[in-house]
Image (tube, grey):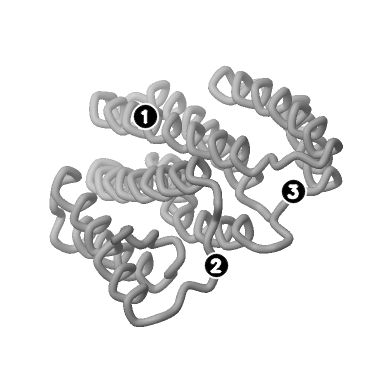
């Protein structure tokens, strides 16, 4: 029997997300325990719902199904890392001069924690009968990316903007020919989330290793935090319908 994809059953993903939240925020279990547990519980309930209910749709594209599962797992992993960073920041940033830095980190963590829900929304859209991305939608994405390229000079974000602009240009050409760009879109989102998770881990380590009574180091952390938020804005752009 083929295992059910939790993305077909939002309630199963919600249950897994609740387990992840409780495990990280309340019980404070390590990643290697809580992430597989949350994923396993989502799979269990997805299969239970599949047994109880008929399938509403099925995607005849195994590669896209595989990438969708990968991006969902990546988003849950990122949300878990963001929760850990939030907890660490609250413990470390207790002085008045830390207020702005803490706000920057919390804003970044909030966006990362919201990402699994946004991924669920875009996945349902991609599975829909009208799921092929229009040329107009891609053109709007390209325009926003180009605007960000002009306004943002950060060393962390700029390479991603350049790469995304080229990817979107290629997808526009494919869409004009009537070809499916969903796989390319999901792979791009997945890679961005995975890269962002690595960067977030490095930021967490830098936060722990910095002298938080040194104004220059605090300011450097604030600038890096602003760039993290800019990178999240790029991910948000790509997960819109």
Please name the residue that numbered disc 3 is placed on. 133
- Chain-order first, disc 2 or disc 3: 2
Q: Position of residue 14 (x, y in %)?
A: 37, 69
Please name the residue that numbered disc 2 is placed on. 57
> Viewed as shown, does residue 183 lie left or right of 34?
right
- Chain-order first, disc 1 or disc 2: 2
Q: Is residue 176 above or below residue 113?
A: above
Please name the residue that numbered disc 1 is placed on. 198
Residue located at (81% from left, 42% from top): 178
User: Disc 1 to disc 2, how far (Cα)?
Assistant: 34 Å
Residue 38 marker:
none
Res. 96 in view: no
Q: Kindly check if marks 2 and 3 are in contact, taking CB atoms under 8 A apart as contact.
A: no
User: Disc 1 to disc 3, how far (Cα)?
Assistant: 29 Å
Mark whose residue sits in front, 2 or 3? 2
Local SS, label 3: loop
User: Disc 2 to disc 3, how far (Cα)?
Assistant: 19 Å
Local SS, label 1: helix
Image quadrant containing the C terminus:
bottom right
Q: Kindly check if marks 1 and 2 are in contact, taking CB atoms under 8 A apart as contact.
A: no
Q: Position of residue 39 (x, y in %)?
A: 27, 55
- Chain-order first, disc 1 or disc 3: 3
Q: Is residue 127 above or below residue 175?
A: below
């Amino acid at each position: 029997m083929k295992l059910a994809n939790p993305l077909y059953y939002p309630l199963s993903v919600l249950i897994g997300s609740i387990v992840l939240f409780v495990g990280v925020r309340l019980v404070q279990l390590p990643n290697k325990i809580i992430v597989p547990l949350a994923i396993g519980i989502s799979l269990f309930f997805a299969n239970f719902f599949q047994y109880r209910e008929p399938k509403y749709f099925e995607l005849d594209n195994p590669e896209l199904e595989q990438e969708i599962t990968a991006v969902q797992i990546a988003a849950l992993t990122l949300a878990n890392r963001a929760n850990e960073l939030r907890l660490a920041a609250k413990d470390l940033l207790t002085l008045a001069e830390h207020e702005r830095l803490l706000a920057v980190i919390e804003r970044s963590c909030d966006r990362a924690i919201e990402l699994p829900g946004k991924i669920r929304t875009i996945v349902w859209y991609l599975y829909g009968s009208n799921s092929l991305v229009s040329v107009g939608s891609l053109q709007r994405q390209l325009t926003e990316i180009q605007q960000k390229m002009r306004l943002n000079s950060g060393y962390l974000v700029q390479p991603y903007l350049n790469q995304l602009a080229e990817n979107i240009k290629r997808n526009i050409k494919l869409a004009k020919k009537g070809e499916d760009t969903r796989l390319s879109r999901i792979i791009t989102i997945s890679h961005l989330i995975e890269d962002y998770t690595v960067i977030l881990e490095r930021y967490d380590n830098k936060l722990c290793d910095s002298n938080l009574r040194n104004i220059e180091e605090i300011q450097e952390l604030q600038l890096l935090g602003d760039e993290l938020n800019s990178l999240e804005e790029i991910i948000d752009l790509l997960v819109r319908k």
